[in-house]
């Protein structure tokens, strides 16, 4: 079975694994099916972390970057399984805890962490709160 990093690569390089069995006859208006983007999640998370944190959206809002008073930066994206992921590299100079106590609903993987149960119906505020709590745990703040 491929590890999580392989899924990230597949997400970018391959077409969808399971195309819909029938064509859609109607389409939702823009912004109604997904009322916020991954970039919006990054902005909301940075606001919760305080004035020392910033964020930016990637192309089309499909990725988000978060940075703060550390060497490392954090990238939000959706993997091939539909999970919201935050990938980052740990820098020795950041002096983070070796075993952070992640909040409920947040899991670690080799390149960072992910929220396997998060979905758009949770709402932007709830998702940003979870990620901000995870970042505080990772950084020990």
Image: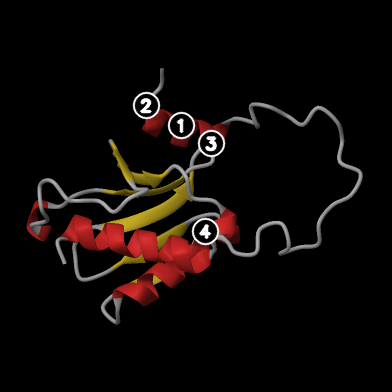
User: Which residue shows up at 26% across the image and 69% down it?
Assistant: 68
Q: Report which residue position mark 2 lands on.
A: 3
Callout 2 crowding tier (Cα within 10 Å): few <14, some 14–19, many ≥20: few
User: Which residue is located at x 55 percent, y 55 percent?
Assistant: 62
The residue singled out by tag 4 in the image is: 38
Question: What secondary structure is marked by label 1?
Answer: helix
Asked if residue 63 is positioned above or below residue 78 in the image, the reply reads below
Residue named by callout 3: 11
N-terminal label among 2 and 4? 2
Residue that badge 1 annotates: 7
Please state the horizontal and vertical placement of residue 26, each as a whole percent of the image: 89, 49
Circle nearer the viewer, 2 or 3: 2
Q: Badges 3 and 1: C-beta atoms under 8 Å apart?
A: yes
Q: Give the alpha-carbon distance from disc 3 to disc 1, as whole Å.
A: 6 Å
Q: Secondary structure at mark 3?
A: helix
In this rendering, the answer to whether 20 lies above or below 64 is above
Q: Residue 99: percent from the left, percent from the top?
A: 13, 46
């Amino acid at each position: 079975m491929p590890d999580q990093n392989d899924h990230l690569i597949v997400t970018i390089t391959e077409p969808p694994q399971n195309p819909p069995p029938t064509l859609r006859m109607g389409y939702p208006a823009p912004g109604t099916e997904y009322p916020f983007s991954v970039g919006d999640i990054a902005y909301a998370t940075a606001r919760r972390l305080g004035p020392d944190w910033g964020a930016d959206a990637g192309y089309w809002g499909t990725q988000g970057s978060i940075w703060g008073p550390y060497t490392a930066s954090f990238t939000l994206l959706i993997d091939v399984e539909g999970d919201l992921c935050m990938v980052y590299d740990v820098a020795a100079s950041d002096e983070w805890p070796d075993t952070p106590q992640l909040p409920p609903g947040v899991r670690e993987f080799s390149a960072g962490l992910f929220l396997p149960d998060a979905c758009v119906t949770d709402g932007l505020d709830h998702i940003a709160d979870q990620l901000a709590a995870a970042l505080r745990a990772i950084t020990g703040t």
